[in-house]
Each structure stands twice: as C-alpha cells, then as structure tokens.
C-alpha cells in the first residue's frame, strides 16, 4: 500500500477538518437561555411553596414547540375572544424560533381531516415509528402520581364556560349559521397561526412521539389552550411528556383555562388560570414566558387588569402562612393577582423569590423579627422609596429588626420601618391573658376602609400592642382597650414622606381572621391603598 507523504497527509487532514467545520453538524447550534419557574414546598407537608427559577440552555435542534388546540372556533364565546388574543403572539413565537431549527408541531385535535393534503401533515405521517413508545402514549392522561401530593385547585366539572347566558345563546346561534356543531365547532387550527410546509401537523400521541424520537428532541414547550384540560391531558400534553422523561415546560403566558368563576373556588377567570399554573409548577413541570424568546414583557390578556399584590410572610406565632393564603383566595381572588412569598424554614432570614416584590403594585407584610441579607431587604426599601402602597398586619411593625440588638454580621435590619413606613411607635404589648376590645372610631366612620363594617365591638384574638403616640400623618380607624389601661390604636392609615400610602393593623391573630369585621377591614384597606395609588 502506497504511503501518503507527511506533508500531503497534513494537508488532507486540514481539508477534512475544514469541510467538517463548515458542515451543519459541526456548526454551533443556536440555543436559548431560558428561566424555568418551578415550586417546591417550604417544608414537608407544609402546604406552602417557594416559587423558584433555574436557568437552562436549550439547543434549538433539540427543542420542539407543540401548539395545542388553537382551533378556529370553540363552543365558549369568551374562550374564542381570548384565543384570538393569544394567536398572534403564538404565531410570532413560531416565526421567531422556526429559522433557528426548533421543531414546530401543530396539534389541533380532531381536525386532521382538514389537513390530509397539507405537506406538514404528510411529514408527520411519514416519520418512521420510534423504536419504543411510552406506556399509554395514545391515551388521554387525567393525572400523574406526583399530583396526588396536592389538591386540584379548581372545579371544572361544569365544562368551564364563563360566558353570560346572553353571550352564549348569541354565539350558539352564530355557530349554527356558520354550519358548525355548537358543541364541537372546530374544523382546523386558527388561520392567525401560520403553518409552514416544514412544520408537522398531528393530534396523535404516537405520531408526535415518533417525531420527537426521530429528531432527537429532548426539550418540549407546550403552548395553546386549555391548560387545565387539553394542554395537561392530551396524549402529547404536559403530563404525558413529563412522565415520559422529556424536559417539558408550559409557556404560561400564552395559554388560557376553561374555568367558570361561578364554580369553586369562586375566583376570577384569570386567577383560575394562575391556580392551575401553580399546580403545574408544583406537581407536573416548570413554566416559562414568551418574553424570554420574543423580548418585551410577558403577554397579559387585555381584560386582565388585576392589580398585583405581593404578600411577604415570615412569622411563626400567628400562622399567617395559613390564614393569608386562605384570605387571598376567599377575598382577593376575583380582583387581585396575589403573589405569596414565604421566608425559608431552613434559613428564616431569607425570602426565596423576594425579587418579585419589585413587580407588585402593593405589598402586604406579615414578618416578625427577621434580618435578611442586604440585597433582599433592599428590595423592600426600594419598593417603599418608589411610593408604592404598603400594608402591615400584627408583627409587621417589627418586621426587620431584633429585640434590643443589631442584625448578625452579614445580615441587615430596618428598625425604623415602623415609624417610617407605618407611622407607628411599637414598644411592647400587654399580656396574652388580657383580652382587648376593639372599637371603631366614630370620627373615621366615613373612611372608605370602614365602609359597611359592622360597628359592634369585638374581642381581639391577640394581645394589645402598645403603639402610642402615632406619627403626624397617621389617621386612626380603630382602637383596642383593656381594663385599667389607655386605649391604643389598632388600625390606621399613614401618609409617608415619600408620598406613598400605608395601612397598618396590630390585629392579625389567627382568631382575628375568623371575624368578618377584620376580614372586611383588611380587604377594604387593600382596595383603598391600591386606589389611592392609581388616583392621579
């Protein structure tokens, strides 16, 4: 055999290397850096969760986007309106990712007849069968084992239609005029989402698994509708993909639910979606938002005008980690988007996710003697300095300071918070054995926070705080009285020097949350604080 001259051997190697580097296999594959949001329990069986994020690098050629059931019609009129809002953003997402090599799969279920001649349908059918398939990949999935750890958050047994009777009747007549079955009017995917010939069209779990296997897809993004039904349960949905070991995420801003606010837990439609997203992040898979790919801000429906309320919870004595989330569902679920941030139980001075406070319109504090790292406390300081409304209950007057000693090294405190933010002057409290009687101040009866509150006295569940005298700019709304001692303010508003509005109440004991008057006081204080900020 003739041996190659060393110089020519080197030249041949260089030629081969150059050719390989120029090939698609050698080219650096586009990738997207994503922030995946997921939730973990603060402690075993606590029922409270930290909402956390982790970053992952998803190569485009290993990633697929499945568009679930973005039909051209639906039996729910309002679902059609929301779907029409979503579709252009989903289309932008596909147009942005398709050139990078992301696999696009359109999955309008029960509509394959409309695409028998479409090249994207032919491509899906032509994919060779995978060497193996996950169990039940052809079947709907109603639950996976991890979901047994929680309670499904909404009642969708009525089908989730949130139309008014008038809207529904008119829409049903319109569908009949169009020659559609009012219960199953979909025929194809909405034309607002373009299907490229190089995409795939399938509603089959088996076919879609074949596509993923043939293309070496490891990462799957689900978008479309409806999260609590098709997006979760279809054979190609979140549950099946998660069970099969795919890195699957929900694009949580480009989705919707079938939820009727007339059903439990009787929250607004968009809060119903939030509750389902919480369930998914806790028990099924992480979520992402479209702005991570498209830029700008996450999508929000035009009619979703709920103010954002952050609740920062870090105290053990009064169990507000239980009472406040319950209060949020029962009293705020129709009008507010509530974000609950708990202190860590392993490191009580830290608040995982506290950076989300910056995005809130109002902040409610239920914290007791915690000294966070400076970077975390600065989030609260900056929120206050921005003139945004702050509300405090019970131990919020001494949220970020220890008793008669400074913060430990490396941590920070804010002993002036009570005076600066709430206009208070907390110094101590009377004994727990001395029950205080709460009375409403007659001169403040016309204040909107007190509107409609039962003026009868009631016994506070906790000890009476000593807070007098209040600062200038404070307006007392209620007092507490124990035998032989001067009355003390237990609820007041405060106009801060930064221009912001605050509300504080030393009520907030677990027994206080059983009082309708206290519940109404707190709800109307939140309403007042947000309205005061929105008023020019």
Image (cartoon, grey):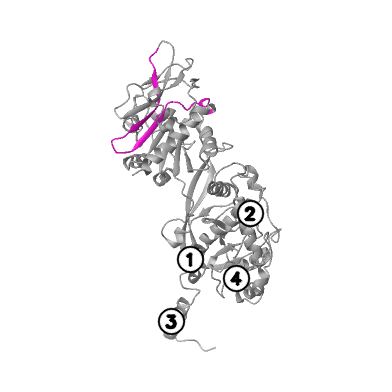
Mark 3 lies on residue: 10
Alpha carbon distance from label 2 to label 3: 61 Å
Q: Establish if 144 lies above or below 461.
A: below
The residue lying toward the viewer, choosing from 240 and 363, is 363
Segment tinted magenta in the rendering: 485-513
Alpha carbons under labels 4 and 1: distance apart: 17 Å
Q: Earlier in the sequence, mark 1 or mark 3?
A: 3
Q: Secondary structure under badge 4?
A: strand
Is label 4 or label 1 in front? 1
Q: Mark 2 and 1 residues: CB-CB less than 8 Å, in contact?
A: no
In front here: 24 or 11? 24
* Pointer 4 or 1: first along the chain: 1
Per the image, label 3 sits on a secondary structure element best described as helix
Q: Is residue 303 visible?
A: yes
What residue sits 38% from the left and 44% below the top? 534
Q: Residues within 10 Å of mark 2 (few under 14, many from 20)?
A: many
Residue on which the image places disc 1: 92
Along the line of sight, the residue nearer the viewer: 157 or 289: 157
Which residue bears the numbered disc 4?
Answer: 200
Q: Is residue 510 in the magenta section? A: yes
Residue 486 lies, in percent from the top left, at 38, 14
Chain-order first, disc 2 or disc 4: 4
């Amino acid at each position: 055999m003739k041996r190659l001259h060393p110089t020519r051997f080197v030249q041949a190697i260089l030629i081969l290397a150059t050719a390989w580097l120029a090939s698609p296999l050698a080219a650096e594959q586009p990738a997207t850096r994503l922030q995946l949001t997921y939730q973990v329990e603060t402690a075993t069986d606590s029922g409270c969760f930290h909402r956390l994020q982790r970053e992952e690098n998803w190569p485009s050629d290993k990633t697929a986007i499945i568009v679930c059931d973005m039909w051209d019609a639906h039996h729910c009129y309002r679902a059609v309106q929301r779907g029409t809002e979503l579709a252009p953003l989903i289309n932008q997402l596909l147009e942005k990712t398709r050139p990078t090599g992301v696999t696009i799969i359109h999955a309008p279920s029960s509509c394959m007849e409309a695409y028998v001649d479409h090249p994207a349908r032919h491509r899906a059918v032509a994919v060779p069968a995978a060497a193996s398939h996950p169990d039940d990949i052809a079947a709907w999935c109603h639950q996976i084992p991890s979901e047994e750890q929680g309670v499904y958050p909404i009642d969708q047994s009525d089908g989730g239609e949130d139309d008014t009777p008038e809207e529904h009747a008119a829409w049903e007549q319109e569908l009949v005029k169009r020659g559609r079955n009012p219960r199953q009017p979909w025929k194809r995917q909405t034309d607002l989402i373009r299907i490229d010939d190089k995409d795939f069209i399938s509603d089959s779990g088996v076919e879609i698994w074949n596509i993923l296997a043939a293309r070496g897809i490891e990462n799957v993004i689900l978008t479309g509708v409806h999260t609590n039904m098709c997006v979760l349960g279809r054979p190609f949905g979140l549950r099946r993909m998660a069970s099969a070991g795919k890195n699957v995420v929900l694009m949580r801003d480009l989705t919707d639910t079938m939820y009727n606010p007339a059903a439990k837990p009787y929250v607004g439609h968009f809060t119903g979606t939030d509750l389902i997203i919480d369930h998914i992040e806790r028990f099924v898979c992480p979520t992402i938002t479209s702005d991570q790919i498209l830029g700008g801000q996450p999508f929000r429906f035009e009619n979703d005008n709920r103010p954002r309320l952050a609740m920062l919870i870090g105290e053990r004595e009064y169990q507000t980690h239980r009472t406040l989330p319950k209060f949020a569902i029962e009293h705020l679920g129709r009008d507010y988007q509530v974000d609950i941030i708990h202190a860590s139980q392993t490191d009580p001075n830290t608040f995982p996710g506290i950076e989300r406070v910056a995005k809130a319109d109002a902040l409610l504090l239920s914290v007791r003697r915690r000294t966070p790292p400076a970077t975390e406390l600065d989030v609260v300081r900056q929120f206050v300095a921005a003139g945004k409304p702050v509300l405090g209950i019970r131990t919020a007057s001494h949220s970020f300071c220890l008793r008669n000693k400074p913060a430990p090294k490396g941590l920070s405190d804010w002993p002036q918070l009570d005076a600066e933010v709430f206009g208070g002057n907390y110094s101590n409290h009377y004994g727990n054995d001395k029950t205080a009687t709460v009375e409403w101040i007659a001169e403040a009866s016309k204040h909107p926070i007190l509107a409609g509150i039962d003026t009868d006295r009631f016994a506070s569940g906790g000890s009476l705080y000593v807070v007098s005298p209040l600062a200038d700019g404070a307006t007392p709304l209620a007092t507490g009285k124990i035998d032989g001692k001067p009355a003390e303010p237990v609820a007041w508003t405060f106009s801060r020097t930064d221009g912001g509005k605050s509300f504080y109440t030393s009520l907030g004991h677990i027994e206080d949350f059983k009082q309708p008057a206290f519940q109404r006081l707190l709800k109307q204080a939140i309403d007042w604080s947000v309205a005061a900020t929105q008023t020019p």
